[in-house]
């Protein structure tokens, strides 16, 4: 039995959350800091209920401050639940709890609710969320989908159907296009918003989906730190190197000299657009919005069997 005599918690008139089943988006509670990380903090409610606060929701100046400078273990803070994932037993939380912040969030929620029956192109999704989507069609370059809950329109390019390039074309052909009760559903990551096309770019690469669920995919260059290992994908290949893509259009450059352990004459001989990669951050220039990474296998070799699991999952879709 763990007790507290912290006055803020003892005298709090805010709701007491003891189980995730009672959690609701918009709920504001007093919590304490359970863990401080480079990419955010973990906060604890009561019992075993915990939530994650990403950098953008900490309310700090990300150009001059890092979480470890502002927060300490067991510090009591006021937090607002922004989303509840009952399936994954995860809470996303924000420390932005001013009247203005809460009013803005409430207005956004009301807008989303009132637009549920509006055209799907107007529905919104959060970048970095993993959502259930329904396959609505296919073309020669990928798969057309819509979010089951909001109806938001999405597109999964062929290269984002698997971590292994050799399976992408097979998966595009194998994924069925059905209507009604037989509609094909799958979990997809919201990578970025293609506003010019009124749709969301999505991915079902296991490496990206898994990293997103662990809150390890950056959506801002300021979230990158030197010597940090990050999962991503090749956004573009140029003569001088490769651009590695993450969320929300964020990219980092892997110069030609950092692409392999051997001499690289042409980056295109080693990498192709859409390819899954694991990189290590070399340097970050937040003011210039630039980051340099390395893709050398000797540095970035994956230490576990995650890519093997990804191959198994992709092959299961083909059955």
Image (cartoon, rainbow, N blue to C red):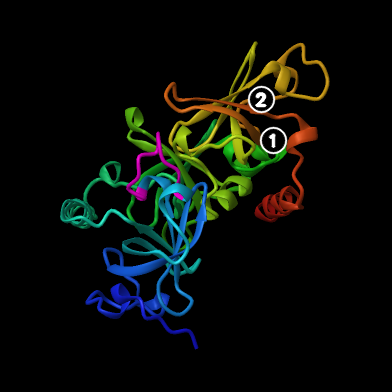
Q: Which SS class for mark 2?
A: loop
Question: Within the magenta stretch, is there residue 109?
Answer: no
**How far across and how far down the image is residue 141, in percent?**
54, 31
Please give the range of residues in magenta.
Answer: 57-67
> Between marks 1 and 2, how big is the CA–CA gap?
9 Å
Q: Which residue is mark 1?
A: 165
**How far across and how far down the image is residue 240, in percent?**
64, 12
278 relative to 132 in the view: left or right = right
> Foreground: 31 or 310?
31
Residue that extends furthest to the bottom in the rendered view of this protein: 1
> Foreground: 224 or 113?
224
Residue in the picture at 70% in, 25% down: 271
**For residue 72, above or below residue 192:** below
Q: Are marks 1 and 2 in contact (CB under 8 Å)?
A: yes
> Foreground: 252 or 99?
99
**How far across and how far down the image is residue 118, in percent?**
21, 49
Residue in the picture at 66% in, 35% down: 280
**For residue 115, above or below residue 163:** below
Q: Is residue 126 visible?
A: yes
N-terminal-most mark, 1 or 2 = 1
State the quadrant of the C terminus. Answer: bottom right
Q: Which residue is mark 2?
A: 272
67 relative to 101 in the view: left or right = right
């Amino acid at each position: 039995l763990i007790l507290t005599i912290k006055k803020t918690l003892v005298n709090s008139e805010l709701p007491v959350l003891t189980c995730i089943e009672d959690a609701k988006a918009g709920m504001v509670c007093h919590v304490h800091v359970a863990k401080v990380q480079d990419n955010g903090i973990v906060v604890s409610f009561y019992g075993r209920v915990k939530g994650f606060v990403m950098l953008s929701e900490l309310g700090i100046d990300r150009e001059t401050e890092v979480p470890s400078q502002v927060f300490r273990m067991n510090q009591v803070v006021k937090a607002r639940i922004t989303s509840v994932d009952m399936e994954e037993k995860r809470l996303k939380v924000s420390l932005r709890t001013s009247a203005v912040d809460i009013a803005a969030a409430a207005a956004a929620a009301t807008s989303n609710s009132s637009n549920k029956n509006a055209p799907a192109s107007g529905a919104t999704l959060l970048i970095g969320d993993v959502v259930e989507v329904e396959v609505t069609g296919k073309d020669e370059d990928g798969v057309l989908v819509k979010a089951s809950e909001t109806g938001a329109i999405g597109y999964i390019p062929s290269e984002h159907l698997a971590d292994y390039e050799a399976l992408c074309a097979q998966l595009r052909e194998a994924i069925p296009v059905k209507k009604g009760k037989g509609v094909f559903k799958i979990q997809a990551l919201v990578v970025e918003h293609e506003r010019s096309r009124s749709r969301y770019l999505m991915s079902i690469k296991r490496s990206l989906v898994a990293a997103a669920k662990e809150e390890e995919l950056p959506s801002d260059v300021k979230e990158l730190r030197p010597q940090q290992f990050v999962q991503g994908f090749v956004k573009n290949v140029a003569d001088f190197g490769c651009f590695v893509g993450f969320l929300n259009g964020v990219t980092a450059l892997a110069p030609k000299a950092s692409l392999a352990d051997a001499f690289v004459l042409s980056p295109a001989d080693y990498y192709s657009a859409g390819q899954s990669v694991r990189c290590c951050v070399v340097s970050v220039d937040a003011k210039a919005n630039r980051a340099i990474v390395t893709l050398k296998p000797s540095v970035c070799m994956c230490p576990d069997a995650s890519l093997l699991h990804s191959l198994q999952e992709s092959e299961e879709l083909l059955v």
